[in-house]
Amino acid sequence: MTNVLMARNIRKTYVSGHQAINGVSISIQKGECVGIVGESGSGKSTLARCLLMLEKLDEGEIFLHDQPLHLMTKREIRKIRHRMQAVFQHPASALNPKRKIIDSTMEVLDTYPNITPVYLQDVRDHRELCAKRLLEMVGIESRYLYCYPHELSGGQKQRIVIARAISIQPSVIIFDEPTASLDVYTQGQILTLLKELQEQLELSYLFISHDLPAVYFLSERIFVMKEGIFVDSFKKDDLFSQHRHPYTKKLVNLFEG
Amino acid sequence: MKIIKQTYQMNSQSLLFILVFAYFLAIVIAPLFTPHDPLQINMNERLLKPSEEHLFGTDHLGRDLFSRILTGGQVTVGTGLLVLIIVLLVGVPLGMVSGFIGGRFDRYFMRIIDSFMAFPDFIIAIVLSGILGPSMLNLIFAIVVAKWGSYARLVRSTVLSEKEKDYVLMAVVNGLSAFQIIRKHLLPHVMGNVLVLATLDFGKIILMIASLSYIGLGAQPPTPEWGAMLNESTPYVQSSPHLMIIPGIAIMCTVLISNLVGDVLRDRFDVKG
C-alpha cells in the first residue's frame, strides 16, 4: 500500500497562545477513507487547514505522494494543489455568489488545463459537457449550470462543492464537517453520495466530523481527537471493543443513548 | 398592477440611459457642428443678446456663446472623465492590494489614506493647484490626489470582508494564484460598489473642475471651460445675465444626470449609503 498523504508530528499554536494541535501524525493510503472524530475546539479544523497548507506549521512534516509539502514554497505547492481537494462546512460561503455554477464547478479544471481525469477524458476539451458530466456525477440536473448559487438549496450547493472537489481526480479529498450545516435527511444523501463516489472513482478521503455515526459509516480507520492530540485510533470494526479509550466510549454512549 | 409598475420603472430607467447616451454623444460630436469658431474674437459684436445668428448671444469679446458652450462640454466633461479614470486606476488596485495583503502594510496604508481624508476634498484640491500653479494638468493632479483615497478605502473594506470567506480559501486550495483570486473572485465583488460611487462622484468632480476654473486655478483663457466662462462673465451679471446663466445650466444638467444615474445604479446594485 502506498501512502497518499502522510503527516508526522504536526504542531500548531495560534498567535493568541492557544495550542490547537499538539503533535499529531496521520497517514492515508490509496483508496482509503480515514475518519477523525472530535468535539468542537478539539483542533480538527485546524488540522484540516494545516494539511491543506493553508496555515503555517510550527513543527512537523507533511508528505503528499512522498513530496515534502512543508519544505516547498507557495509557488511549488500551487503546482500540485490539484492532488489535494477540500470540502468545508458551509457550502453557501464556499461558492462565490457572483459566479455561475458552471464557473464554480470548473474552477479547478480551468486552473489546471493540462490535467485530464480518466472519467472526463472524452469531454475534456468541451467545457460545458465537462461541467454537465460532473453535475450528473453528484446528482444535480444540468439546467442549474447557468444559475447562481442563491438559486440552489444547501444540499445542492454542497453537491456542487463536491463536484468541484472530484473534478480533477485528486489523490485525497479532505472533508471538514461537510454535513454539519445540512438537515438530517440531506446529510444521509450526501454521505451515501460520498461513499458511492469513493468506490467508483477509487478516491482517498480524510473525513473530519463531530458526528460519530457519519464517520463510522464512511471510514475504515478512525482517529479520536481531543485537545489537539489523537487519544485513540482503531479500525472501524473495533469501535465497540472493550479496549477503547474512555473518551471514545463516552462518545459512543453519547450517540447510542 | 405590478407588471405595469415594473414596465414603467424599466422604461423610465431605459429612458434615463438613452438620455445619458444622447448627452455624451452630443458632447463628443457637438464641437464638429459649432456654428462659429469658439475662439474667434469680434469686438463689433460683443455682449449681444440671444438671436438667430447667435443662439445664446455673445460674450464680452464677441465670441459666440453657443459654440463656446458646446466646445466647453468636451473640456469640462472630458476632464471629469479623465480624472475619474485616473482615480479608479490608482484607488482600486491600491485598495485591493492593501486589503488583500492585510497586516502591517494595510495598517500603514490606511493611516496614509486617513491623513488624506482628514481634509475636505476641495481644500486639498485648492491648495495643491494653488501651489502647483494654474493649469489644467495640475488641476487634474490635484483632484486625483483629493479623490483616490475614498476609492481605495471602499475597495479595501470590501476585500477585507470578502477574503475571509470560504470561497477565497477554496480558491487557494484549488490552486489559483493571488492575481487570479483578485481577478476572478474579488474584482466582481468590488466593481458594483465602485461603479455606483464613481457615477455619484462624477457630478462632484465636474463641480470641482468648474469651481477651480472659476477661481482661476484650472482652465486658462481663452479655453472655453464652463467654470472659466462663469468667471469671465462676472463683471457683466447685471447687463448680460445670460452669460452666467447658460454655463450654469450646462454644469447643473451634467451634475444632475450624474446623480440620477448614480441613484439608479445604487438601487440596482443594492448598495447601502
Image (cartoon, rainbow, N blue to C red):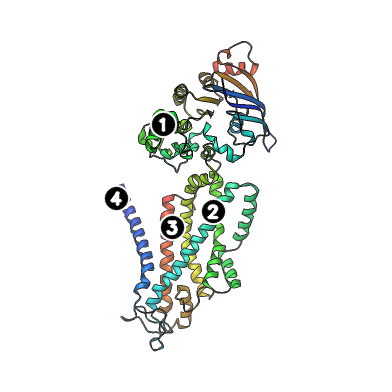
Q: Are marks 2 and 3 on the same chain?
A: yes
Q: Nearer the viewer, mark 2 or mark 4?
A: 2
Tell me which chain the residue with mark 2 is part of: B
Q: Which mark is residue A120?
A: 1
Cα distance between the residues tagged 1 and 4: 49 Å
Q: Which mark is residue B183?
A: none
Left/right placement of residue A59 relative to residue B159 reads right
The span from disc 1 to disc 2 (Cα, nearest Å) is 38 Å
Give the camera-side residue of B47 and A206: A206
SS for dot 3: helix
Q: CA distance from mark 2 to mark 3?
A: 22 Å
Report the residue marked by disc 2.
B93
Residue density around tag 4, few if under 14, some if 14–19, many if 20 or more, within 10 Å = few
Tag nearer the camera, 4 or 3: 3
Residue under pointer 4 = B4
- State which quadrant residue B22 falls in: bottom left
Amino acid carrying label 4: it is: Ile
Q: Nearer the viewer, mark 2 or mark 3?
A: 2
Q: Which chain does the numbered disc 1 sit on?
A: A
Pinpoint residue A176: horizontal percent, then vertical percent: 55, 29
Q: Residue at x 55, y 59 (%)?
A: B148
